Image (spheres, rainbow, N blue to C red):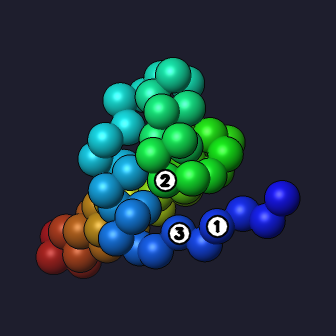
């Protein structure tokens, strides 16, 4: 069975609706017409991306502060 391609809007909406449980993934899977593992992958991928961006921002700020001293 071929997976349906999710749009960025659907992925963002999915992240808002996800509450951290597998049951939630299964319900969202039915809602969006994809496997629940796909939902989990997208949500985890977005969370990793956000954490990476925060880390990079903090790193740049710390580096900037060190240069001021």
Q: Which residue in the structure is indicated by mark 2?
A: 32
Query: Of the numbered discs in the image, which one, if any, rests on residue 4?
Result: 1
Quick check: 40 above or below 58? above
Query: In whole angstroms, how far apart are the C-alphas of marks 3 and 2?
Result: 8 Å
**Residue 6, label in figure:** 3
Measured from the top left, where is residue 58 in percent x and y?
Answer: 29, 61
Location of the C terminus (image quadrant): bottom left
Task: Name the mark nearer the viewer: 3 or 2.
Answer: 2
Across and down, in percent, residue 13 comes to: 31, 56
Label 1, secondary structure: give it.
loop
Disc 3 and disc 2 in contact, CB within 8 angstroms: yes
Q: Is residue 50 left or right of residue 69?
A: right
Label 1 with label 2: CB-CB less than 8 Å: yes
Q: In the image, residue 62 lies at what x, y percent?
A: 27, 63
Relative horizontal placement of residue 20, taking residue 23 as reference (left or right): left
Q: What element carries label 3?
A: loop
Residue at 38 percent across and 51 percent down: it is 14
* Disc nearer the start of the sequence (3/2): 3
Farthest residue toward the right? 1
Q: Quadrant of residue 56?
A: bottom left
| Residue at (53% x, 69% y) in the render | 6
Residue appearing at x 51%, y 22% in the figure? 23
Quote the CA–CA distance across marks 1 and 2.
Answer: 9 Å
SS assignment at label 2: helix
């Amino acid at each position: 069975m071929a997976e349906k391609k999710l749009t960025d809007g659907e992925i963002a909406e999915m992240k808002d609706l996800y509450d951290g449980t597998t049951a939630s993934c299964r319900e969202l899977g039915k809602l969006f017409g994809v496997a629940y593992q796909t939902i989990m992958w997208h949500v985890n991928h977005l969370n990793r991306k956000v954490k990476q961006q925060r880390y990079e921002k903090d790193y740049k700020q710390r580096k900037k502060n060190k240069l001021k001293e």
